[in-house]
Image (cartoon, rainbow, N blue to C red):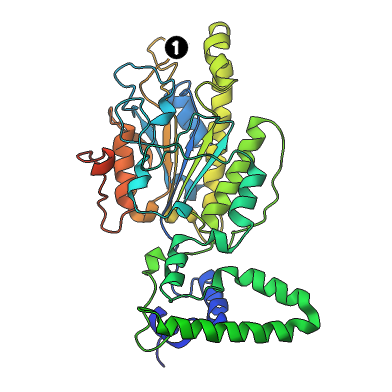
């Protein structure tokens, strides 16, 4: 018996609706070892944290053994722009970049050659202080309403096609109908007795499409030279937990909005709708954090601020747990980064709360293995390395040859952080 491989499968059944349906089944059962593309989710919150130990505890609170084995909390990490003592107001504009100043700069992932559709920016009351910037240093507008985010990303199948599938469609190696297959099935079911007419129309459309594909330069209709569209490691893969119409909780508080945006981020990862997702929770001047530092901090020793930031960190840990649940561990091929531009307010020897703008030992955790690019867990001593070293390692991990060309955005000569 000839072993069924990805190559002879595509030789046999490329460019047919049947193949699309079968491929969806094979993919969901991991028949070819499909693992999904590498993905990064970056979650930010402003104004730093209370102290390292409490933050480390909260970021690991309630983690399952599986998640904990893929969790790394960085101690002694600094923000390149502020480590010299500059306060972190407006630091959002450069936290995700290789910049040494507060000037807007391209985010590190803009040099990875990703399609715009593979970069998603979500925000909760982030206002006009944007964390994510394009290759021209222009702010990427954050979608700040969870319901709008779901409609935008999942409401229209074809417009949500990932860049991998789009390239295959444009080269004639994938049926243009495939990304809309669920919609096609739904329409057919609604047609009742007219479904036969609809099927006939689809058959004619398929024949026409195959004819065009065969005539196109580089097109392939499934003959003997059909190529596997991607390596197993880079195959788009919808996790079994993918749900393109999840129920959002709603609610007017920033915490409730954050929960719903995390749901959106989860589905973007599980459904393979993006390779880089940024979720910004507030900014350095959005209440209540700012007042919790400068006003309440004088009277309660930072207890209010500590309570607020711990709630953020607990949500991060809860979300990381969810990414590892079930048979398919999303974190095997992904990394979720939590980071803030502000330092530790109560890491001084006497433990007093700093109501100013401390700049050292910013909070940061990395959950996930990113396809084997991240191998450490537990507490990692960053020893004064900066966000730029972290971005270097993540960018390299997202590049096929393991070394991203970051010279054009200021990343040349930066060494990986070593996690």
Q: Is residue 270 above or below residue 75?
A: below
Q: Residue at x 72, y 86 (%)?
A: 196
From the viewer's perspective, tell me whether residue 366 is left or right of residue 143. Answer: left
- Residue nearer the viewer, 225 or 298: 225
Res. 63 visible in picture = no
Q: Is residue 214 above or below residue 46?
A: below
Q: Residue at x 59, y 48 (%)?
A: 264
Q: What is the x, y in percent for residue 37?
A: 42, 59
- Residue nearer the viewer, 15 or 290: 15
Image quarter in which the C terminus is found: top left
Q: What is the x, y in percent for residue 10?
A: 43, 82
From the viewer's perspective, tell me whether residue 347 is left or right of residue 16. Answer: left
- Residue nearer the viewer, 182 or 23: 182
Q: What is the x, y in percent for residue 68?
A: 46, 44
Q: Residue furthest right?
A: 193
Res. 368 visible in picture = yes
Q: Residue furthest left?
A: 413
Q: Residue at x 44, y 11 (%)?
A: 356
Q: SS of the residue at dot 1?
A: loop
From the viewer's perspective, tell me whether residue 99 is left or right of residue 46. Answer: left
Tell me where residue 124 sits by quadrant. Answer: top right
Write down the residue under mark 1: 356
- Residue nearer the viewer, 307 or 99: 99
Tell me where residue 94 sits by quadrant. Answer: top left
Q: Residue furthest bottom?
A: 1
Label 1: few (<14), some or many (≥20) within 10 Å?
A: few
Q: Is residue 119 above or below residue 193?
A: above
Q: Residue at x 70, y 82 (%)?
A: 198
């Amino acid at each position: 018996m000839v072993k069924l491989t990805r190559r002879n499968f595509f030789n046999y059944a490329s460019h047919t609706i049947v193949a699309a349906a079968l491929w969806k089944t094979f993919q969901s059962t991991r028949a070819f070892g499909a693992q999904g593309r590498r993905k990064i989710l970056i979650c930010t919150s402003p104004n730093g944290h209370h102290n390292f130990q409490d933050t480390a505890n909260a970021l690991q609170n309630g983690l399952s053994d599986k998640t904990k084995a893929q969790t790394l909390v960085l101690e002694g990490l600094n923000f390149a722009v502020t480590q010299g003592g500059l306060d972190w107001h407006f630091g959002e504009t450069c936290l995700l970049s290789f910049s040494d100043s507060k000037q807007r700069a391209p985010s590190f992932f803009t040099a990875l050659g990703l399609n715009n559709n593979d970069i998603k920016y979500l925000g909760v009351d982030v206002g006009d202080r944007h964390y994510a910037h394009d290759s021209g240093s222009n702010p990427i507008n954050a979608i700040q309403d969870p319901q709008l985010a779901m409609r935008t990303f999942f409401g229209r199948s074809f417009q949500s096609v990932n860049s991998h599938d789009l390239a295959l469609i444009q080269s004639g190696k994938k049926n243009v109908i495939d990304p809309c297959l669920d919609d096609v099935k739904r329409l057919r079911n609604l047609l009742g007795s007219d479904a036969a007419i609809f099927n006939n129309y689809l058959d004619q459309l398929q024949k026409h499409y195959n004819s065009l594909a065969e005539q196109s330069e580089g097109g392939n209709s499934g003959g003997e030279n059909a190529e596997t569209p991607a390596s197993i490691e880079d195959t788009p893969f919808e996790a079994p937990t993918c749900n393109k119409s999840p129920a959002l909780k709603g609610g007017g508080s920033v915490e409730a909005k954050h929960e719903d945006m995390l749901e959106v981020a989860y589905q973007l990862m599980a459904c393979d709708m993006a390779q880089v997702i940024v979720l910004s929770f507030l900014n350095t001047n959005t209440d209540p954090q700012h007042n919790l530092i400068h006003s309440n901090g004088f009277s309660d020793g930072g207890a209010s601020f500590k309570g607020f930031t711990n709630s953020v960190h607990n949500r991060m840990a809860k979300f990381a747990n969810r990414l590892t649940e079930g048979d398919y561990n999303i974190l095997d091929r992904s990394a979720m980064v939590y980071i803030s531009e502000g330092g530790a307010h109560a890491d001084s020897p006497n433990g007093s709360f700093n109501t100013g703008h401390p700049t050292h030992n910013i909070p940061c955790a990395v959950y996930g293995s990113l396809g084997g690019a991240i191998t450490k867990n537990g507490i990692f001593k960053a020893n004064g390395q900066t966000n730029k070293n972290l971005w270097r390692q993540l960018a390299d991990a997202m590049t096929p040859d393991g070394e991203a060309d970051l010279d054009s955005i200021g990343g040349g000569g930066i060494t990986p952080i070593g996690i």
